[in-house]
Image: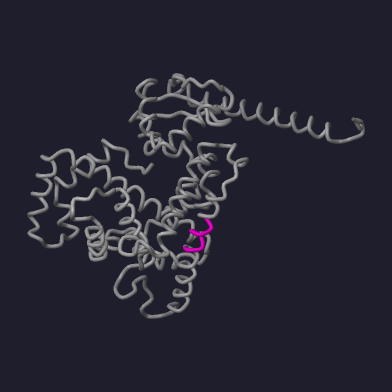
Amino acid sequence: MIYNSSSPVPSILLGALVLAAVYNLISYITTSRSRRKIIKPNDCKPPPKYPLRDPFFGIDGIRDALRAAKAKTFLEEKRGHYQQYGNTFSSRLSTLSIISTIEPENIKAVLSTKFEDFEVGSPRKNAFSPLLGNGIILCDGQQWERSRAFLRPSFSRSQVGDLATLEVHVQNLVKAIPYDGTAVDVAELFLRYTADVTTDFMFGESIQSLSQPESFHADLMAAFRDAQLGGEWRFRLGRFARFVPQPKFYTAVRLIHTYMDAHVDRALKYRQLQHGSVDDDSKTDGRYIFLHELSKVTNDRRTLRDELLTIFFAGRDTTSALLSNLFFVLARNDHIWTRLTAEVDELHGKQPTLEGLKAMKYLGFCLNEGQRVLLFISE
């Protein structure tokens, strides 16, 4: 083998290694200074460390997380970690230092009292941006404020309280439940129900996953699932995700974007036709349509698609998880079920109003307790 001493490759490799080392050193110094500014005034103590055999990249932690996710035991194992190492502990994910916490005061600080001191961060953005783009749940700072201001007017109580539309989908849900005593996975039915409601609210037409489960939209539901699971895997892989082929994830993303883009294009065309009309509002046949309202604010296709996807996943997953958890508890506590049905029976078969639902105190207690006791973010 003849070595060519004039080849630039060794010099390029050496230069790249030196630059990487300098970059990591600068990042370490900058991060350390930022942390010291927080640690001293708040009297922070170092959290316990989750024991990793690989202290540099946490490869064994990534492997364990992927294995638990595949076996659907991720939340159970995470709970075991908190029981063993306390309410707050540190670990590593790829090259990142991670702090996991269930301490109420910490969560209160992150989500409320010191919200502006925290950011979404690159791990979540890198994992989900191919799917969600620049939607509000991937934004920080001024961009988050703009997204919030963009979306907030469309969520007034009078606009989202369409109980007649909800009733249609509730009836479809009830019809999908077998009456012969056959076991049924209500979690899957709740997921379809919330998908139907969310798409109806956003577009003025539902994907009908409950009433027409064998239609094209069954493939779309599978795409939503594959894209979400793919994003979670990308998050757990961290910086190693770029080296792992993900054809299933990107195929699902393309199908979802095609579906969303078609609705966005139709809404923009509708807005052009309605421009200048005396009856220029966001209602079609007396119904409020979320996308029509957003298209009044911007005609940027990418912005509309990104925010719609964010609303879809938020509206579908959290609500279906809450309903699944609630019925899991109700099925095991007859006294709660009896008291809840007694309150519902006071309607005497009539459809409730928004005010009537708000007045159902025990129902509200059940929903609040379901959120407190069981995690309602879908796994």
**14 left or right of 51?**
right
Q: Does 351 appear in magenta?
A: no
**315 left or right of 259?**
left
Give coordinates of residue 267: x percent, y percent: 45, 70
Give coordinates of residue 49: x percent, y percent: 47, 20
Name the quarter where the C terminus is drawn.
top left
Name the quarter where the N terminus is drawn.
top right
Front residue of 308 and 245: 245
Q: Residue drawn 32% across and 68% down? A: 288
Q: Residue drawn 36% across and 73% down? A: 281
Rendered view: 167 above or below 58 = below
The magenta segment is 253-259
Which quadrant would residue 207 be assigned to in this image? bottom left
Labels in figure, total: 0
Q: Residue drawn 50% across and 28% down? A: 61
Which quadrant would residue 378 be assigned to in this image? top left
Give coordinates of residue 46: x percent, y percent: 46, 19
Q: Residue drawn 34% across and 72% down? A: 283
Give coordinates of residue 45: x percent, y percent: 44, 19
Q: Please identify the dominant SS of the magenta region.
A: helix
Check the image and tell me how it is coloured: one colour
Front residue of 365 and 232: 232
